[in-house]
Amino acid sequence: MIRLAAAAVLAYVAIAGVPQMPAAGPTPTIEEPSVKLQQVVADVGRALAPASEFDRLVWAATWEEAAKLLEASRKDGHYVTFTDTLGVQAYQVVVLDIAWGRLAGAAGKYPGLQEAVEEAFSATIGPDVQPYTPEVEKRLTGLYRALAWAGLNRG
């Protein structure tokens, strides 16, 4: 029975060839951030240097979509409304927990990543809670996209 199954597999391979995995979809294109933001997220890129392609794609997509949500909220007011940066921080924690921690299973996988992200946020919006203004939103969306870029491009 095993010989018959092996012969069938070999015959299939001889006729149809070795089955190929489907090609991966295109890698998302993230606009290159300013030199200043590249410096801010450089440690993030270094922490993600050993990351798998899957982890990089999840990382980039998570931050890119987070940036889009902030922008959409301002434009139509139907998604999320923040009053201060503490609310944004809570949003980020939930987004990363779901996407990075649960879907990718990558929470805690890359030493120094959490610290690098916290430093990037502190450098961009400061350590103190402040009102959520269009200027804060602009800095945050720029940082979110820089974080996505750092993951895809290794900083």
Image (cartoon, rainbow, N blue to C red):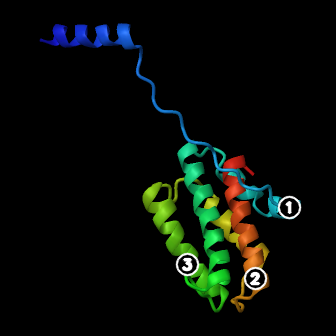
Gap between marks 2 and 3, in whole Å?
15 Å
Label 2 and label 1: CA atoms lie apart by: 17 Å
Secondary structure beneath dot 1 equals loop
Q: Can residue 126 be seen in this view?
A: no
Residue 15, image x and y in percent?
36, 9
Name the residue: 59% across, 58% down.
61
Mark carried by residue 91: 3
Image quarter where the N terminus lies is top left
Q: Position of residue 28 (x, y in %)?
A: 65, 50
| Residue contact between numbered discs 2 and 3, judged by CB atoms under 8 Å | no
Q: Going from the N terminus, do you reach mark 2 or mark 3 first?
A: 3
**Depicted 78 relative to depicted 34: above or below:** below
Q: Earlier in the sequence, mark 2 or mark 1?
A: 1
Outermost residue on the left side: it is 1
Disc assigned to residue 136: 2
Amino acid identity at mark 2: Val
Q: How many labels does the image show?
A: 3
